[in-house]
Amino acid sequence: MEEGGVALLKQLTQILSDQLIDEVGYVHPSQLAKLHEGSTHVDNAVADPSVFWCGEHKLAISTQALVPLYNSAKSSFFSSHQTLLGKSKHSFHGSGINERFQELLSLTRVVVVLNPAFKTAWDARKCIFGILSVVSPLQELQLSSLVLSFNPKSEDAWAHRRWTICSSVESLFSHQIPEHLLQEEFKLVAMIADRSRMNFCAWRHCCWLVQWMSPVQMLQELQTWKSWAQLHVAESSCFHFRRCIFEKLLTDECPLVKVKDAWLEELNWIKKLIKLYIGREALWMHQRFLFFLWVHYFKPTDPAESIGHPFPLVEISFANSCIESCGDDEDGQRQIAYASTFKLWVLWKCKESSTWFDYSMLKTRELFNIEQLLRSKAAYQKALWEGLYERVKARSDEETC
Amino acid sequence: MGELSIAKHVDYIKSLDKKKDLETVLTEHLRMSGAYWGLTSMDMMGHLEEMDKEAIVSWLLRCQHESGGFSGNIDHDPHVLYTLSAVQILALYDELDVINKDKVAAYISQLQQEDGSFAGDEWGEIDTRFSYCAICCLSLLKRLEKINLTKAVEFVAACKNFDGGFGCTPGGESHAGQIFCCVGALAIGGGLHHVDKDLLGWWLCERQVKSGGLNGRPEKLPDVCYSWWVLSSLVMIDRAHWINKDKLKQFILDCQDKEHGGISDRPDDAVDVFHTYFGIAGLSLLEYEGLKPIDPAYALPVDVVDRIFYSCEKKQPSH
């Protein structure tokens, strides 16, 4: 192990013993120099200024020092890990054992900050937590947040979070997640999703939280996230989170009429967004979902109820109005393709649920039209459109037989 | 149309083990999967014998733990992801007999939960990716009876979404990588009837963007790795003819580094072994000339899978 690495590891371990550090960044040595020039006060005087900058609980590390630092951290971690948690681990009653566990905990902190994908280090913490109960949930959530501050897609940091919450929910909160913790988690996701677009892991975390939410909380979150979604209409995952809430509401003991109100509101909102933001796939996917909900939950049982304005026809007219008002630019072409595909979706779902709906009438009127539009606006997907067209036709032929 | 620079890619994969740059150092923990990607690529290109089999197998065996599971590298903790990679590597080399199959099977079966799902390791994270690893691995070891397969299949089926896709847990967002795992698990586990093939085929084919590449979710950029995740799923559900194969082939070929070898996620990005493997595997599914065909469910060359399931003869002892 290089001498330099050992000294740097000591410094970094000491810096990271400040539990309040909430942001880490890896910077080029020239940027590091600029940070030092620009600040009058540094938090840590012992740290090598050519490698670290530390101020206001923010830490910058020079990218040039990463390899020696990491190698040194890794070998110290493995040697301590082997002794304390490995196959030939010593008894947990030895003298000074607490200090040695604390030492290992500090090393795991350094290792996951240097390499968030180092799962064995995350898991060593869980292991020690189990043996000593010295690790507080708050501390674990903070460490996870710290890592997510520079690596927002770290699967292991998100998983460690879930593990921490699960273990605390069982022991501390009697199987319920307290409101303030829930709100903290949502706050974190919103902050991360703002900076890191299309972050599957962050939104997965939101969907995971849904299991602990009451119907009231779920309806509330649908409202709260609206403004975020409006500003990020390409974030399909955010709309999926809404779908996740709707599906959960429909399996929970929430009165159907309340869900239907939320659904109606969602429908009007999404249509407004579709008209406003031309050619957004995420919006049209959500529109498909809302139609799916209608077919499965909100369709009137008595056909007489919707004579005059059958809902599928309303949806087809909406898609047609989108097609008619589109220009021929790239966004417009996409909008036309998505609107046409949506019409295909409506026909497909109606047919599939073999409703009272007069499918054959709509079929002859629409299918040809849809195929023409798709072929001209999304010609490279010709094979798909032909395939789907054949399937719809085959399905309706079965019906007439 | 440009061609696949097989000789360059072979050199690139052979060079990987000598690298000591930051990226290599930071990915040491998943070396087992890296080895699987590299070796399977070499086998598809017909150059597997150029790798040092003995060194690889002896290193691999050092990654096995008391529990029977394998870790991504020596000293790391075992995980079902790396256990599958290790078994796949041994399958490539026709060396499955060097491990105690019952022990590996025992490690995997204890990861199954009440609801049929699988944890990735002792820490309990649940994901349909782990269901795939478990089912694929046990099938290669011919030990599927060690788990409750009916429940395993039911759990995967419960992760199906309104769009025909699958997520990591029930209610999870559809994602092409996740879909591969779920469809693969169902294909091997005999549960493909749970898939709405038309609907899923529709969603998967909509992943193709104008450049010909495939993305993994709506609104995302195309990425070579989805050539494998999407296309293999389409093959398993018999809807591969719905995709524009010529455009996809072109997109993958455009992602090659023709000078130094290797394939990247998108044209002109930096290459890595992960995307090199998925690019070659995608081209193999597209029946690219000069590549061995790959099995869409086991993610191993078809002759390797056939050897495991259809050859009755025991391997000749080596001298």
Image (cartoon, rainbow, N blue to C red):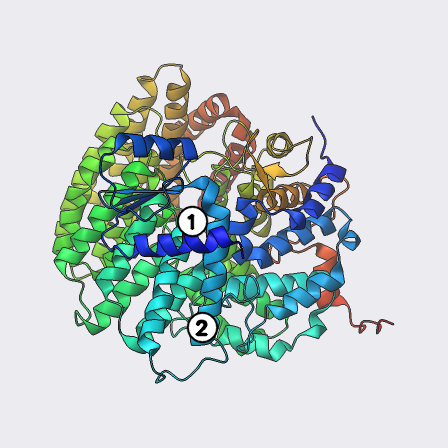
Left or right, A269 with reference to A360:
left
Crowd around label 2: few <14 · some 14–19 · many ≥20 (10 Å): many
Observer able to see residue A384: yes
Crowd around label 1: few <14 · some 14–19 · many ≥20 (10 Å): many
Observer able to see residue B160: no
Give whichever of discs 1 and 2 has the lower sequence position.
2
Residue reaching furthest to the top:
A328
The three-letter amino acid code for the residue at tag 1 is Gly
Residue at numbered disc 2 = B112
Task: Give the percent coordinates (x, y) of residue A40.
Answer: 22, 34
Task: Give the percent coordinates (x, y) of residue B234.
Answer: 56, 46
Residue at numbered disc 1 = B164
Task: Give the percent coordinates (x, y) of residue A216.
Answer: 12, 54
Task: Give the percent coordinates (x, y) of residue A102.
Answer: 32, 69
Q: CA distance from mark 1 to mark 2?
A: 25 Å
* Residue A299 vs residue A340, the one in the foreground: A340
The three-letter amino acid code for the residue at tag 2 is Gln
